[in-house]
Amino acid sequence: MTGMERNADVVVMKSFAPLFARLGYTQWCPDMIWFDGKRAYGSASYYVQKLYSLYTGDVSFPVSTDDDKVFASATERDGMTFVKVVNASDEEKTAEVEADFEFGELTRIIRLEGEKGDYNTAEEPTKISPEEIAPAAPRSLVLSPRSFSVLVFRK
């Protein structure tokens, strides 16, 4: 999704399919929202999609990384800059956020992370779900293995 956001001038629409799955009645498991007769819960993909929709801007900025397992995108809206970072590796990484423009103050970090093989279930519906962490440095961030982070800057 970072690639779609970085190329928003040519990517007009995006979607996730299949969207809903009834527990015990599916042929595969990449579904976004699972349900039975009593409850429903979102997958990790659901939370990633939700974070992209909540923290999106109307202006996109060019972004690059020095690591082929780290992906990033940045957008801005109403004086807020949203930087999304994916660490697809099995190792912790440290990221330094730099740009040719003023981001402002890092006010929030929302992170989604999990171990290999982790997934949400009806018994543990929020095993992999977003958590807010306090910024430790103005432009530096420790990226957990297999994580997705949203950095929110305010001008």
Image (cartoon, rainbow, N blue to C red):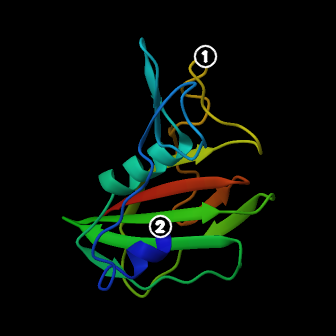
- Kindly indicate the quadrant of the structure image that contains residue 133: top right
- Kindly indicate the quadrant of the structure image that contains residue 92: bottom right
**Residue 103, labelled with which disc?**
none
Label 1: which residue? 123
Q: Which residue lies furthest to the top in this view?
A: 38
Q: Which residue lies furthest to the left in this view?
A: 78
Q: What element carries label 1?
A: loop
From where the camera sits, is residue 141 visible?
yes
Residue located at (68% from left, 83% from top):
66
Quarter of the image where the C terminus is located: bottom left
Q: In front here: 74 or 133?
A: 74
Residue located at (34% from left, 71% from top):
75
**Residue 1, labelled with which disc?**
2
From where the camera sits, is residue 155 visible?
no
Q: Eyeballing the image, is 90 above or below 58?
A: above
Residue 143 place in picture, x, y as percent: 67, 57
Q: Which of marks 2 and 1 is nearer the N terminus?
A: 2
Residue 93 place in picture, x, y as percent: 73, 63
Q: In front here: 114 or 150?
A: 114
- Kindly indicate the quadrant of the structure image that contains residue 69: bottom right
